[in-house]
Amino acid sequence: MSSAAGRFAPSPTGELHVGNLRTGLLAWLFARSTGRRFLLRMEDLDRVRSGAESAQLRDLAAIGLDWDGGIVRQSERGDLYLEAIARLRNAGLVYECFCTRREVAEAASAPHAPPGAYPGTCRHQTEEQRARRRRERPAALRLRAQVDEFTVTDELHGSYTSAVDDLVLLRNDGVPSYNLAVVLDDGLQGIDQVVRGDDLLSSAPRQAYLGSLLGLPPVRYAHVPLALNTAGQRLAKRDGAVTLPDLAAVGLDAAAVRTLILASLGLPGTLDDALAVFDPARIPREPWIFDARKST
């Protein structure tokens, strides 16, 4: 087996729905079809619901997915993140930011500002200004980006360029940011293939740029279509029977759900058969509209 790896990295905030399981299954297919290891990571730096991790692992196993090695948890890797921030800081690539969420939102919505981008409000503060602000609120740490945009290559979307702003590395409550943790973890775990929902495509260039600053090898991206409800919105628990336990209660066991997911990808109903014919070029490019009422 290759030393390279793909991964699935859910946040343990609740049960996985069929859209999450579909993305996890696709990540498994991408990794296994290319001889890569398949790793699981829990992105648990933020909100965590008791019992969610064990429920997610149970459901992934129930649809037949296997993985290599133990589960990596971001909550156990804080020292690695702080060491990476220290390296960036020593290189002059970090500055303190005292902006509130409201101030960031207002600045990002100003005329001529890239959508959602931080415009560098605190980037050029003097030491006197920073000292005064420290007395008012704790600082977050931001990356002092040296480029305005960055380009990645995606398996499904081709060449993709997006703006790079001064993203947060450490929140003002002392918690490392998602963008830092995911980039560093992928590099340290030998993950060179990132398969995830296409709602995260716009964040790939900034993450790839951060990875380059940290000296990490580039990754191959594949941003896959999401599962949506019948109103064209992202699937969620409010849409009714969308988790394995809920679907089992209306007559669909895990094997039937797996077959349903594979059918949505134009693949045969078992993992062995699906893996034998899997071709990323044939993945549907449109979202999967999931209607539990028509699936039971």
Image (cartoon, rainbow, N blue to C red):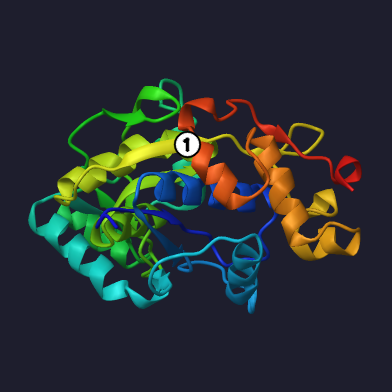
Q: Quadrant of residue 229?
A: top right
State which quarter of the image contains the N terminus. Answer: bottom left
Q: Which amino acid, by three-letter code, is at mark 1? A: His
Image side of residue 180 versus residue 90, left or right: right
Q: Which residue is label 1 attached to?
A: 223
Please tell me how crowded label 1 is: few (under 14), some (14-19), or many (20+) other residues with Cα within 10 Å: many
Q: Is residue 223 visible?
A: yes
Vertical placement of residue 231 versus 189, above or below: above
Q: Is residue 165 visible?
A: no
Say which element carries label 1.
strand
Towards the viewer: 137 or 90: 90
Image side of residue 251 versus residue 221, left or right: right
Number of callouts in the render? 1
**Residue 218 in the image: x percent, y percent?**
23, 42
**Residue 119 in the image: x percent, y percent?**
34, 35
Vertical placement of residue 48 versus 143, above or below: below
Q: Quadrant of residue 148?
A: top left
**Residue 273 in the image: x percent, y percent?**
58, 45
The residue sitting at 21% across, 31% down in the picture is 147
Towards the viewer: 253 or 137: 253
Image side of residue 278 versus residue 15, left or right: left
**Residue 59 in the image: x percent, y percent?**
65, 66
Q: Quadrant of residue 290?
A: top right
